[in-house]
Image (cartoon, helix red, strand yellow):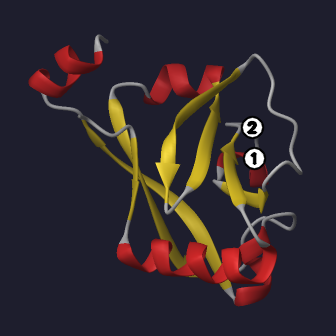
Amino acid sequence: MVERVTATDEAIGLIRKLQEKHGPVMFHQSGGCCDGSSPMCYPEGDLMIGSQDVLLGEIAGAKFYMNKNQYDYWKHTQVIIDVVDGRGGMFSLEGVEGKRFLSRSRAFTKDETEALGI
């Protein structure tokens, strides 16, 4: 099975820390300007998911959604969630930890693209 979204070990560690503090969490990447172009972490249910959001998968038990318009650009890539030092989006849970989530990606291979049907 090809995963559309994965995370680095450091990102998984931060997600687990946030889950311990806040309970279940979720991610959304809207593709908008500024903060919206970064993966944002929220307490599960704090952000209303709509018909224009695509569920890419789960990382460390947290669902990861992307706006459909953004997904159309990224659908040929595997999204890899990483974490770096710095301040993230003001509404994203990791901001107070002095860390921010960051999306990296790699292009799917031909076999992976065929398996995904894209």
Can you give x and y, in whole percent of width and height, for residue 117 in the image?
28, 11
Foreground residue, 46 or 97?
46
The circle drawn on residue 36 is: 1
Can you give x and y, in whole percent of width and height, for residue 79 in the image?
41, 45
Q: Secondary structure at mark 1?
A: helix
Can you give x and y, in whole percent of width and height, for residue 5 in the image?
42, 45
Q: At 73% across and 18% down in the image, what residue appears?
A: 52
Whether tag 2 and tag 1 are in contact, CB under 8 A, the answer is yes
Q: At 23% across and 34% down in the image, what residue appears?
A: 1
Q: At 87% across and 63% down in the image, what residue appears?
A: 91
Residue type at mark 2?
Gly
Number of marks drawn: 2
For label 2, the crowd category at 10 Å Cα-Cα, with few meaning under 14, some 14 to 19 and many 20 or more, is few
Would residue 111 be found to the left or right of residue 36 on screen?
left
The C terminus - image quarter: top left
Would residue 117 be found to the left or right of residue 9 on screen?
left
Give how far apart the Cα atoms at labels 2 and 1 are: 5 Å
Instruction: Kindly tell me whether residue 86 is visible in this rendering.
Output: no
When the figure is inspected, residue 9 is found, relative to residue 3, above or below; the finding is: below
Residue identified by numbered label 2: 32
When the figure is inspected, residue 97 is found, relative to residue 112, above or below; the finding is: below
Residue type at mark 1?
Gly
* Residue 40 position by quadrant: bottom right
Q: At 38% across and 37% down in the image, what residue appears?
A: 4
Foreground residue, 117 or 22?
22
Can you give x and y, in whole percent of width and height, for residue 33 in the image?
76, 43
